[in-house]
Amino acid sequence: MQTFRYNIVSFSQIGKRLRNEDHLITGSIGDISFFMVCDGVGGQANGDIASRLVCLTFQDFFKDHANREINESYMEEALAKIRVAFEAHISRHPKSQQMATTLTLAILHPAGVSMFHLGDSRIYYFRNGKICYQTRDHSLINELIDNNIITTEEANGSNQNHIITRAVSSISSQSAHPSYHLQSDVQIGDTIFLCTDGVTESLSAGALIDLFTEHPDITDAAHQIKSICAQHSNDNYSGIIVQISDM
C-alpha cells in the first residue's frame, strides 16, 4: 500500500457542436482521488444535463463513502444513487426521460487505480511508450464483431460506429453494469488519459502513444490533443490527463 502523487491537466471544448454535452470532474479526500469524464449521448434529450448530473452525484457519493473499499460493489452503489438522481430530475422535467450519458471513472487509491466505464468514452493507461490497459467500447459494432457477424475490417467502414449498447440512464442503469479494471502496479511516470469520443475520432491509440512519447509534459500533450481535435473532430472533445509523479 502506498500514497501516490500526481499532476493533472484537463480540457473540455465545444468543438463544432452547438453546445457542449461533455462534463468532467475531479476530487480528492486524503489519499484517494477520482477523475471522471462523461459524454451526454448524442440524439437524446438533455445529454448535457445527464453528464453533469452523473458527475455531481458521484462527487457527493465519493464524499460520503471516503473510507470504502474501491471495487465493483462500490460502483454499483454509486450507480444506484445516480439512478435515483435521474429519476428525481425526470419527475420534475418529464421531457428529460430519455437522457443518457457515457461514464469513465478512474480512482487513484493506495491499492492502485480502479477504472470503470460505460459507453464509448475511453480510459487509456500508458507506461514507457506503451498502453498497459485501455477500455473497450460498449458498442453495437463490438458486439457484432464478438458474435462473428462482421469482421474488424468491415467495422472500420460502418456507419454504426457511434451506436453504444451501455450508458447511464434512468431506463438502463439497473442492467447496464460498468466494466471494471484494477491497475495495481502503479509506477512513477504512468499516465492515465480519460476522454470522450470527440478525442478518439481524431486520435487513434497509436497516435496517442506517439503524442505522449513526444510530449512527456502533460500540459504540452493536452495542447497538442486540443489542436488536433480542433481540426479533425466533429464533436465536443474533453479529457483528463493524470501523470503519477514523485514530487
Image (spheres, rainbow, N blue to C red):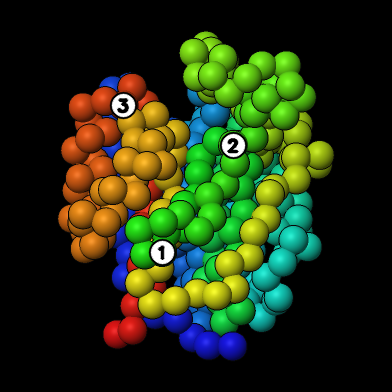
Label 1 packing within 10 angstroms: few (<14), some (14-19), many (20+):
some
Estimate the spatial distance between the alpha carbons at disc 1 and disc 2, rounded to whole Å: 21 Å
* Residue 95 in view here: no
On the rendered structure, is 140 left or right of 47? Answer: right
The amino acid type, in three-letter code, at marker 3 is: Ser
Question: What x and y, as percent, mark residue 213?
Answer: 27, 56
Residue at numbered disc 3: 233
State the residue position of label 2: 137
State left or right for residue 123 relative to residue 70. Answer: left
Mark 2, other Cα within 10 Å: few <14 / some 14–19 / many ≥20: many
Quadrant in the picture for residue 217: bottom left
- Contact, mark 1 vs mark 2 (Cβ under 8 Å): no
Nearer to us of marks 1 and 2 is 1
Q: State whether residue 28 is above or below residue 156.
A: below
| Residue at x 49%, y 86% (from the top left corner) | 3
Q: How far from the left and from the top, in percent, is residue 232?
A: 26, 25
Q: Secondary structure at mark 2?
A: loop
Q: Which residue is mark 1?
A: 127
Between label 2 and label 3, give the one nearer the viewer: 2
